[in-house]
Image: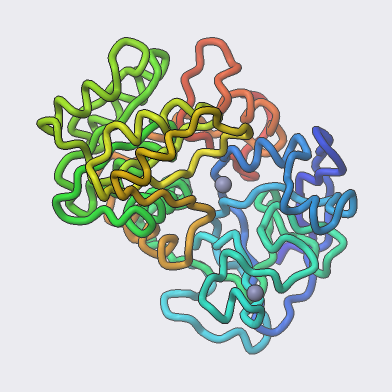
Amino acid sequence: MASQAQALVQRGPFRAEIEDLPIPALAPGAALVRVEANGLCATDIDAYAGEDPSARARLGDRRFPRIPGHEIVGIVEDLGPRTLKRKDLEIGTRVAVNPMIACGVCEFCQRGQTTLCRGFEFFPCYGTIPLWHEHGLWGGYSTYVYVHPNATLYPFPHEVSALDATLWNTLSAGVQWAVMTGGVSLGTTVLVLGSGQRGLANVVASRSVGAGLVITTGLTADRHKLDLALELGADAVIDVESESTVDRVLELTGGRGVDVVVDTTPHATAPISDALDVLRPGGRIVLAGIKSRLMDGFPVDKLVTRGVTMIGATSQSTDANAAAAKLVAAAAVPLHKMRTHVVGYDELPYAIDLLTNKVPGEKAINVVVTPTIGGGH
Ligand SMILES: [Zn+2]
Ligand SMILES: [Zn+2]
């Protein structure tokens, strides 16, 4: 077995290089995963720039050095002493690693709100735990990752490839936001604002539970994403630059409006106003896009007089992750079409440029970062 891992070590904002690190002995209950692939999301992009409020609030500059990468898929390579044999989980099994580690004993863990855990000195998410914290290999941009005894692993059937399995994290946002937080179920009418990978995931999750009508929105430059949304199960798509979201949704719903709106759009606040105009009385809005700004002219009275529920959605629960892993394995729709690029972990800045549409001629939706290929794109 290998004694060293090759990891991308981040020593500060925009500073990361591949380094050799020792693979530690495994503590009781722990496991070692040989990393095959990682998803890339806005959290990774912000963290690379050092914009990571949760980690910074707890450790300040001590949050570095660290290994980025939190949407991890790989093969179980080794189990620590007395690690309980878990169902479907043996050496050689392909797994996804739940990025959030829960202490199990703090106030929030005891309430079952493990994604709000406050039991560790550090922010307990893979990709942000510093190297100096015991065992060190806490990020997916590495050939090996250390699995904390409290971490959850989700197994995949052998026939699901590592690249397809990596879509689990994206899909989990759809399961959490639309189905679990939004309450989408059989017959629900739903509007998904935004058609990035998280928007598409909300379309897939809504469709998988039998939503009655699924509509999604995008910009003119997002035409390829809107076309894919139709292929993944959306009934209708709206180009917000050439048509009115409000008029179109009211037309599609016979003037009634939708039961649920899920907002996945970053930065823009106008979609929230639109949402209040297209929601049926008593409907629900799930806010999942980070805006990084305040919203002027918020129409409070519409919320009050129409009895609307507005709820913020943060990271995904263990149940949402498990359901998403099963959804990937079931593969009822061509999910793999979301994956547009696979990039070596030594080219993280290029992967970030792809995902943020800064590479001319490339139209990215889902970008995979992997330690198993490197050099040249
Ligand atoms: Zn992520
Ligand atoms: Zn806790």
Residue 241 in which image quadrant: top left
Could you tell me residue 6's position as x and y percent?
Answer: 76, 50
352 displayed left or right of 19: left
Between 235 and 88, the residue placed more toward the observer is: 235
Residue 38, visible in the rendered structure: no
Residue name at image x 81 percent, y 46 percent: 9
Left or right: residue 56 versus residue 74 is: right
Q: Name the quadrant of the N terminus.
A: bottom right
Residue 237's place in the image compared with 51, above or below, is: above
Give the answer, above or below, for where 210 lies relative to 302. Answer: below
x and y percentages locating residue 4 in the rendered image: 79, 59
Seen in the image, is 309 located left or right of residue 279? right
Give the quarter of the image for residue 329: bottom left
Q: Is residue 155 or residue 66 the one in the foreground?
A: 66
Task: State which quarter of the image contains the C terminus.
Answer: top right
Residue 236 visible here = yes
Q: Residue at x 73, y 80 (%)?
A: 27
Residue at coordinates 18% horizontally, 28% vertically from top-left?
Answer: 250
x and y percentages locating residue 92 in the rendered image: 51, 67
